[in-house]
Amino acid sequence: MSLLSHRAYWRWSAGAQFARLPATMAPLAFTLLTTAALGSYRLGGVLMSVYVVAEMAGAVPLARVLDRVGVARGLTILLLLAATGFALLTAAAAAHAPDTVLLALVVVPGAAAGASSGAFRTLLADTVDDELLPRAVSVDAAILECTLVGGPVVVALLALAGPLLPLAAMTVVCLLAAVLVPRRARPQAGATDDVPSASLITYLPWLCCAFTVGLLLSTIEVAPLPLVHRLGAPDTAAPVVIAMLSAASIAGSALCAWRGKTGDPRLFLAGLATGGLALAANLGWPGLIGSLTLIGGCTGPLVAVTSVSLQRLLPKNRRSAGFSLSFTVQACGFGLGSLAVGVLPLWLAPLFGVGSAAVTTGMLLLSGRRHRMSPTPRAKRP
């Protein structure tokens, strides 16, 4: 079945995007709320920090619970809890509740966000077969870029009617995601469900791929202003940097989806490393445009090959936890990259991503060599 006419996939995609939308709306929604209520954005930053910590801390433990109780049923309950958390947060903000109450209420939807991404990715294995999986993951990566951009835009439009409306909308979005959670279908033809358990060292190169993506993306997404200031451009040029990065990422994912194949991850890591070096070297506008094109264009395909490879390695009863761990590792990379931008010279920050790409490439080479050298079991004689 073609992906364009795959109704189950598009239902899954709509649910996944609704589940992701609150996390993209939260930074601006929290800031606008606390600025309107208290005249300061600082509490909004603290709320977002608590949200992120809860997201990272709860991702793997909650995903393990979902693996045990059933991913579809557990995910529906989790999204309903997230909606309840946002509804209580909206009511508390309307009642001018103390800061500690707001900080406590944001923990539940934050923790739910961390596990829901891995759970939705797990359900994708039952939605499309192995032949369509690379294309499905690539299309999802392109749509995700639109969700990342669309979240703040939705908040800005809703805030025109009041600072509480974005929080109420996040409640509704979680409810829509819960309604769209696909029921676990029978495994598709050719699907690889019975996968033996593997050691952590087998997963490690792919987790490092996710870490590298987060590390290099944060170098650009957190520092658009200093990047354009370094070239003598005004503040208004900063959104252009993010737009170019997103466009390159969408184009890379679209190309991967059109081919229907994931490609060699070492090639994409080399592209990320080259783009990071160009970013660090400060080669003017040509260097910045080239680095944005390389980093963005290689991000989507690398995310796709990482996702497909992890699915082949993860046992069926651990997929939610495995995918949630991958998303958490990528978030850690993003956080460390953001910290590097904040405390280091601008030219030095991208080099950490370059080093991570080089180390990950070496790990993939060693992993492939170890796989080729492992003895192949002989077939039993009849």
Image: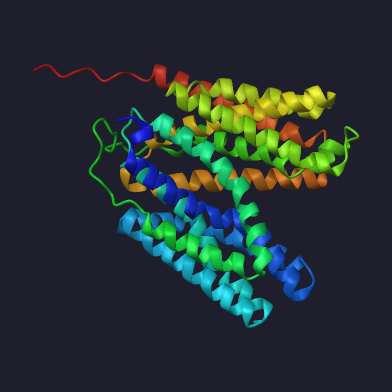
**Viewer-proximal residue among 50 and 83:** 83
Report if residue 351 is visible in the image: yes
Residue 164 sits in which quadrant?
A: bottom right
Where in the figure is residue 350, as x and y percent of width and height? 74, 34
Where in the figure is residue 20, as x and y percent of width and height? 52, 52
Q: Is residue 269 above or below residue 111?
A: above
**Viewer-proximal residue among 95 and 184:** 95
Q: Name the residue located 79 percent from the left edge and 22 percent from the top edge.
A: 286
Q: Is residue 91 above or below residue 343?
A: below
**Viewer-proximal residue among 169 and 205:** 169
* Labels in figure, total: 0
Q: Residue furthest right?
A: 232
Q: Name the residue located 26 percent from the left edge and 20 percent from the top edge.
A: 377
**Viewer-proximal residue among 1 and 205:** 1
User: What colour scheme governs how the chains and residues are painted in the rendered image of this protein?
Assistant: rainbow
Is residue 115 rendered to the left or right of residue 289?
left
Q: Is residue 246 above or below residue 367?
A: below
Report if residue 46 is visible in the image: no
Q: Residue furthest front?
A: 161
Where in the figure is residue 257, as x and y percent of width and height? 46, 27
Q: Name the residue located 71 percent from the left edge and 42 percent from the top edge.
A: 221
Is residue 72 rendered to the left or right of residue 321?
left
Q: Name the residue located 42 percent from the left edge and 24 percent from the top edge.
A: 260
